[in-house]
Image (cartoon, rainbow, N blue to C red):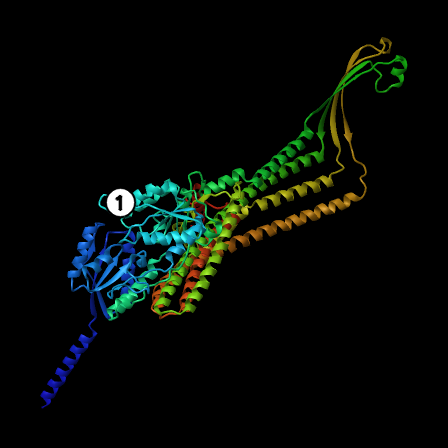
Amino acid sequence: MKRESIFYILSFLLIFATGAQADTKPKEVKVGYFEGGAYYLHKVITSEIKAELEQFSGDSINIIFEPYAYRSAEWKRDICRSYGRDFARMNDIDIVFAVGPWVVEDLLDAGYKGAIIGIHQFDPVSQGLIDTDGRPIADNLTVTYHPGKIESDIEMIQKLFSPRRIGFLYFPSADESDKIKSRLALAADRYGASIISSDTRTPDGNYSFFKSLGNIRDEIDVLYLPPLWGVKLDQLQQFFNETAMGRVPTFTSEGFLLLEKGATASNCIRPDLPLARFTAHKIIRIINGERPADMPTTLDEAPAICLNLEAARKSNVVFDRNHINNAKTIQAVPSDNIPQYSFSDAISQALRENVSILRKGAVYQEALAAAGSAYSAYYPQIKLNLSAAATGNETEAVIYNNVLNREFGTDIILDQKLLSYPVIKAIHIAEKKLQIEKAGLEQARLDLKHTVAVAYLSVIENEEKVETIEKKIDRLRQYWEMSLANSRLGFNDTLDILVIQERLVAAKMLLHDARAELNISRVVLNVLLNRPGDNLVILDKSNFAPEIMVGMARKFDDYTSDQNRKKKFEEFLVNTGIANSTEMQITSLSIGIQRDLISQHRKRYLPDITLRAKYSYNNEFKPEFGNDDDTWTIGGYLSLPILSGTSWKHRGNEAQAALNELLYEKDMIRFDRMQAIMTATEKLTSLVATLPMSYFTKNLALDNLEPAYSRFKDGKLTAVELLTLEEHASEMEFNLLRRKIEFFSTYSEMLFEVGVGYLIYNSAEEAEFFTKLEKFLE
């Protein structure tokens, strides 16, 4: 009895487990793929749909994309029809992705019974795939379209280009071309514009974008492009090159991905992402038993300008600044005549042409001339006197006229200073002033080098800041577009859309400010380089690359690896900084000048001794007053001050007080230099320790965004929660950027205080400096 009970229990458990396993087995759905021909965006869209399906289906549905149910007609119309009939015979294919032109019509004509998912149809209403009520014409069909898409695009074309003649090229799926052109003409007529189109075919009967473009290129101001079906990936750029050669800007309905291939503008960025979400959700509902025709068909497109500034430049188009500021842009490629500067080029240019350095050089030349003037007091002084006179009373003139008492006379006089203590001290003072100006010129060069480094880093920081904010805007725009799609699916309410939109607008404000700061930093650098403030330059960032920063960080980490080594490192820097300090040199020279002034004051009663030699030749008025003769004399004179009042005492006290002040100042400079170097070293050491953490936190924060975004799409995370994580990730990006620039700025500040200035990576000066440092640390 006991054995029988155990047998029944085991049998029951086995049956229960088998039933449970059968209940939990995932539902299998076989999917086919059908396109009229390969097109760049077909793969992009279907890949996005597959990714969304994987997220939606979970473990309960197993979606199988059957290889034998993949059909691409290579843009052959007859083959496409035959493939439609093939699908009609595949009774085991539950769903077909019908992508692009022809395929939906061919599946319906062939009588395919499974669900048809119409994807990437330009205008299903004009194609006759949707009736006037917005319902698909067949129960097994669902498609998606953007109401008002054409009208919205025409409106944006007018805002950007203000054309009178709009070109239009369209690859038809059936006989909808005339309907679409009529709709376009009506939209363009509101702005006083007309539509010009061409319908030129290839020998096999397909629409030819290249030939059609050639027919209308000279007659249009802008070209409006729906999907470029039939144009291969490697032909897309060639097509846009031809429009650029004809100076015809292009406006694509397909978004930013076509701008990357050469289109000029669009009114959407990534419409494939919300479309994929919307389509995947409908597929899951169809798999769960709902009828395809009952699925929603309208999905509002999120309007967002995107501009290709390089394509615009090639087409001689200049966009309004406000449009550029509010758009996602592809920047223009710098022309060959735009100067490119490496960091060493910028420093050389500044030292060569900066106005302040040129002025400082002129001051040095003035000091050089003043020193030469002081020396000239000991040079021989030669003077020539000539006199000639006539008189009506020669006797009286000779007796009474002390000046002109000869008919003709000449004197040559030589004065040679033999001894003058004030002159000797004046020469010493002039020499020291010359050395002061020379040191000042060297300090000005060092200051300029450091200022250029700071300005150069400021431009790099602001460029990267703009790039970081643009990435943030792209994320927020993606969240916003997805929230629109989710709202249509019932996953989010309108509050989520508004919250994300508010953050998006705030990020655009940040971008405006960042671009202004970038322009200002460029002006500052240009002025330092003696170039026009609005001059565009391209800066080489290789001296500040992450790998260089890592190598420098490791080096400084080694120099400060323990307390004793760190002290020796700081000692070397302080000693070098004090030895190189031009401020110390200038103060020492000023002390010397002050001592010369004191000595000059104390020995003011020393005599001045001058040697004089004179040669004279005279011709008298009358021979009886003397014969014509010449004379010479040689001798000297001594000048000895006797009394100079009482003010000398006050001047002596003032000079001594000024000397004491300079001595204290020298000590202050020494301590200030020590403080500045040790502060920069401590800051650099801290940055070396925290930079790896900044990289880690930034990467971790960005990695966390992906699963958070997926949870948001599934409705498991609110918009506020997602935005909190996004804000934190952005903060970590800005924090890393700030620390990277701060690392190089602190390094520059430290070397500036040491008196060597920024050392170019891998330069001889850098090698010499660190060789001396490492020898000192041994």
Q: Quadrant of residue 771?
A: top left
Q: Residue at x 48, y 43 (%)?
A: 536
Question: Is 174 left, or right, of 469 in this rendering?
Answer: left
Does the image show residue 501?
A: yes
Query: Where does residue 543 sit, x and y in percent of width and height?
Result: 42, 46
Question: Is 473 left, or right, of 455 in this rendering?
Answer: left
Q: Nearer the viewer, residue 547 or 98?
A: 98
Q: Residues within 10 Å of mark 1 (few under 14, many from 20)?
A: some
Q: Nearer the viewer, residue 567 or 754?
A: 754
For residue 771, above or below residue 124 = above
Question: Is 527 left, or right, of 652 in this rendering?
Answer: left
In the structure shown, which secondary structural element does the residue marked by tag 1 occupy? loop
Residue named by callout 1: 201
Q: Looking at this rendering, what residue extends furthest in the bottom direction?
A: 1
Q: Nearer the viewer, residue 295 or 401?
A: 295
Does the image show residue 255?
A: no
Query: Where does residue 760 sit, x and y in percent of width and height?
Result: 45, 44
Q: Amino acid at mark 1?
A: Arg
Q: Residue at x 17, y 80 (%)?
A: 16
Query: How many numbered circles are shown?
Result: 1
Query: Where does residue 488 sit, x and y in percent of width and height?
Result: 36, 67
Q: Nearer the viewer, residue 768 or 731?
A: 731
Question: Is 590 left, or right, of 303 in this rendering?
Answer: right
Q: Quadrant of residue 303?
A: bottom left
Q: Looking at this rendering, what residue extends furthest in the top direction?
A: 623
Query: Where does residue 358 sit, x and y in percent of width and height?
Result: 57, 38
For residue 35, above or below residue 655 = below
Q: Quadrant of the N terminus?
A: bottom left
